């Protein structure tokens, strides 16, 4: 587990800024997705944190320690950062079994190992198993083949997974041949008593030498867990392999070779292999992109469980916004090397920082409608969608448009000053890939280039962001406070229906729950869900506030 801090990270390839002055704090144990269109700098960011790419300048801290500092000349290599990788093209070794694939990397690791009393651990696990004869009976029952004989392999795997033990421990349990006993419970009770005695003896020995064991059977000496720098033993490797395999549910495939597994199973082996050395940070670069849609969904949910169970910090690169939304605690959305927003998925969806973010996140995409408006008494009277008169009321009754404009102007001025200061610094290189205002698409029925010369936007020019689910179909009859729309296309998927509605030359997308199919060409009357409309500045593209949109005419 680790906290990661990026300070003013720049990665330049000559004059091209792949990552431009990125500042980010990734909390310990969080799951952060790096999201953005192709070429926005996601992979480069991930590789810099991992130590696979050297930033041009800036500082990276891993758990409070600088692993990269351009000023101090610090650059800790990837293999010293205790990080794990899982890339799109995970290559399993074809000549090794699943078990060997996962265990391979563990045999050469030499680091501080928490000392466990394995004799005690095994005795405790056996004591636990023999104290629960009902569970043993069930496991034996489940492991019998058609002729009623015990399938030793199956029983071993079930014991390993159920009691979280090693293969050796499972073999030991099976060596008592309890399944053949007429009175399994009585025999198990006798064994439980024997192991209770062994445990008492071991405990007494520890006490004599001034030691204790914690609940994980780790040895406590002078109030601290005893650690030794050494390689892992065979038993420890086995326990690790079994533990990670349990998480990704591949315990039953241990003896197979990669070519005997499905794509999803191979993927899970790759995940287990990455997890086995217990990296404090796990980097994943589009790890699910090779899988079919159904499997992707399944693996997504497994990755979420995996994060929950391992509590490691996960940084995950994807250009799939659904993946980013569903997996992450926080999304870092980038464009042209520049951070656009870093926030929780629902915050990004409900409070997009700017038009780019609003447009990038959400499927179907948000409707963007240009509007011109003037303020009276905290409300905006607007004209949009050719000649519709609308009124925008901010959700916050105290919202002050003038103050907001000043704040936005200040932010722009501060950014400009910051850039100018950077430009004054020695060695500054002019950015070739210039940042431009995001050119959003207004959905219209006419296709082809916009012929009308658009005037530069003023402070009275806005863009309304209307999520498809914020479009209400009110009725098929004209009603006050609604807009007339014509059904342009209807796409029912069963659970929900997506419709394109034509309003003059504009098209609005609407999504609603259920499968009512309106005939194409029919007239509908719509309004907009209260409090769900986003108001953006057309001049600088930033979010001004959220509010409600009332239809006046
Ligand atoms: N070695 C290099 N030399 C020059 N430009 C590079 C180099 N490596 C990356 N870039 C450029 O840096 C930008 C960011 O690349 P990066 O791989 O981080 O993008 P990405 O967001 O991960 O994209 P994708 O989703 O397509 O993988 C791209 O425009 C890329 O062309």
Image (spheres, helix red, strand yellow):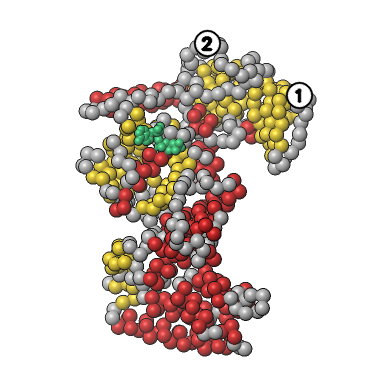
Where residue 133 sits: x, y (%)?
A: 57, 81
Where residue 281 sits: x, y (%)?
A: 38, 52
Which quarter of the rendered image does ligand 1 occupy? top left
Quarter of the view holding residue 136: bottom right
What residue is at 28 percent from the left and 36 percent from the top? 57
Can you identify the residue that label 2 sits on? 453
Q: Nearer the viewer, residue 261 or 405?
A: 261
The reply to whether residue 552 is visible in this rendering is no
Can you identify the residue that label 1 sits on? 521
* Disc 1 Cβ-to-ligand 1 distance below 8 Å: no
Indicate the quadrant containing the C terminus: top left, top right, bottom left or bottom right: top right
Tell me the CA gap for discs 1 and 2: 31 Å
Q: Secondary structure at mark 2?
A: loop
Q: Is residue 94 left or right of residue 390?
A: left
Where residue 177 sits: x, y (%)?
A: 54, 84
Q: Nearer the viewer, residue 509 or 320?
A: 320
């Amino acid at each position: 587990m680790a906290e990661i801090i990026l300070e003013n990270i720049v990665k330049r390839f000559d004059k091209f800024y792949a990552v431009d002055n990125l500042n980010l704090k990734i909390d310990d144990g969080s799951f952060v997705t790096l999201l953005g269109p192709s070429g926005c700098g996601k992979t480069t960011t991930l590789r810099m944190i991992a130590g696979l790419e050297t930033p041009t300048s800036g500082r990276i801290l891993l758990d409070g320690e600088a692993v990269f500092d351009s000023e101090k000349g610090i650059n800790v290599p990837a293999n010293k950062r205790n990080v794990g990788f899982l890339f799109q093209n995970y290559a399993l070794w074809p000549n090794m079994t699943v078990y060997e694939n996962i265990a391979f990397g563990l045999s050469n690791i030499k680091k501080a190992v928490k000392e466990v009393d394995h004799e005690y651990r095994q005795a405790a696990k056996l004591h636990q198993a023999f104290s629960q004869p009902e569970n043993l009976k069930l496991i034996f029952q489940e492991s019998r083949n058609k002729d009623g004989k015990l399938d030793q392999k199956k029983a071993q795997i079930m014991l390993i997974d159920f009691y979280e033990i090693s293969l050796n421990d499972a073999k030991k349990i099976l060596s008592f041949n309890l399944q053949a006993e007429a009175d399994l419970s009585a025999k198990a009770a006798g064994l439980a008593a024997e192991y209770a005695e062994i445990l008492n003896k071991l405990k007494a020995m520890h006490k004599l030498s001034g030691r204790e064991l914690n609940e994980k059977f780790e040895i406590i000496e002078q109030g601290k867990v005893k650690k030794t720098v050494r390689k892992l033993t065979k038993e420890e490797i086995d326990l690790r392999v079994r533990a990670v395999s349990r998480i990704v549910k591949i315990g039953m495939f241990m003896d197979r070779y990669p070519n005997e597994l499905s794509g999803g199973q191979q993927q899970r082996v790759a995940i287990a292999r990455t997890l086995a050395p217990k990296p404090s940070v796990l980097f994943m670069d589009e790890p699910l992109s090779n899988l079919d849609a159904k499997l992707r969904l399944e693996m997504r949910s497994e990755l979420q469980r995996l994060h929950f169970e391992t509590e490691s910090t996960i940084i995950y690169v994807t250009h799939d916004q659904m993946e980013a939304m569903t997996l992450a605690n926080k999304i870092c959305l980038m464009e042209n090397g520049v951070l656009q927003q870093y926030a929780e998925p629902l915050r990004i969806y409900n409070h997009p920082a700017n038009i780019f973010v609003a447009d990038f996140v959400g499927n179907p995409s948000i409707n963007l409608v240009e509007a011109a408006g003037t303020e009276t008494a905290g409300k905006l009277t607007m004209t949009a969608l050719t000649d519709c008169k609308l009124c925008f009321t901010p959700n916050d009754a105290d919202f002050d448009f003038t103050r907001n404009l000043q704040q936005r102007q200040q932010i722009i001025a501060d950014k400009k000053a910051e850039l100018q200061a950077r430009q004054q610094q020695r060695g500054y290189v002019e950015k070739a890939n210039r940042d431009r205002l995001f050119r959003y698409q207004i959905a219209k029925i006419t296709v082809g280039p916009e012929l009308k010369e658009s005037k530069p936007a003023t402070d009275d020019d806005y863009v309304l962001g209307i999520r498809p689910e914020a479009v209400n179909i009110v009725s098929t009859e004209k009603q006050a406070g609604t807009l007339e729309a014509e059904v342009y296309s209807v796409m029912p998927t069963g659970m929900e229906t997506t419709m394109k509605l034509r309003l003059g030359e504009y098209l609005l997308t609407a999504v609603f729950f259920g499968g009512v199919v309106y005939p194409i060409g029919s007239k509908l009357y719509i309004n907009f869900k209260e409090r769900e409309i986003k108001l953006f500045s057309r001049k600088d593209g930033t979010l001004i506030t959220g509010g409600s949109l009332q239809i006046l005419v």
